[in-house]
Image (cartoon, rainbow, N blue to C red):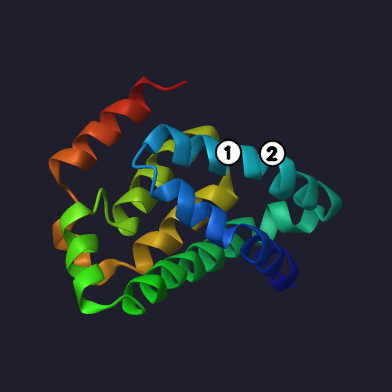
Amino acid sequence: MLDPLVSMFLKKYASQFYKVLNTRDIRKVVQWLERKYREIIAPFVKEHPWLALLAEDQAGQKTGELLGNYIVEKYEACSPEKKVAWNSSRWLHHGAVGELIVIRETRKHRPFLVGLGRGLMISDLHDQSEWHTPEYMKAKKTLEEMR
C-alpha cells in the first residue's frame, strides 16, 4: 500500500534530488525536501489518513533507501577517473545528509522526511566513519540556525 507514494516520489524527483544534493548547500537540500513534502506528501497523507498513523515514516524510509541506491548507482556507473574526481570533491556522504534531515525533521514532526533521512543513512552505513567531517559540522550549524 505504500508503493504508490514511494514510486510517485521516486519517478518524479530522484534526479531532482540528486541535482539539489550536488549544490553543496544544506539549506537548499532541506528547503527542497520540505517544499516537496508540502506539495506532494502532505496532500497524499491527507487523502489517506491511515498512512499518517501507521506508515508515513516507513514510506519515507523506503524512499530514502531507494534515493540512496540511486546515488550509489550513479557513482558506480562512473569511469574510474570520474570516481576519483567524485571522491575528491564530495561535499557530504548522503548518509550524513540523511542524519541531518532526521535531526531537523524530528523536531518539525514530519515522519515521512524523518523516514527518508533514515533511509539515506541505511543505504550509506558502510561509509559511516566518514560522515562527520568539517563540512558536516558546518551544515549542522547552518540547519540549527534555520527556522
Q: Which residue is mark 1?
A: 34
15 relative to 117 in the view: left or right: right
Q: Which residue is mark 2?
A: 38
Q: Residues within 10 Å of mark 1 (few under 14, many from 20)?
A: some
Q: Residue drawn 33% across and 78% down?
A: 76
Q: Residue drawn 29% across and 35% down?
A: 139
**Are the residues at dot 2 and dot 1 in contact (C-beta closer than 8 Å)?**
yes
49 relative to 126 in the view: left or right: right
Marks 2/1: CA–CA distance: 6 Å
Q: Residue drawn 54% across and 49% down?
A: 113
Asked if residue 8 is positioned above or below residue 41 in the image, the reply reads below
Q: Position of residue 136 (x, y in %)?
A: 22, 42
Q: Position of residue 143 (x, y in %)?
A: 36, 30
Q: What type is the residue that disc 2 sits on? A: Arg
Q: Position of residue 52 (x, y in %)?
A: 70, 52
Q: Nearer the viewer, residue 90 or 30?
A: 90
User: Image quarter for residue 58?
Assistant: bottom right
Q: Give the residue at the far right of this rendering.
A: 47
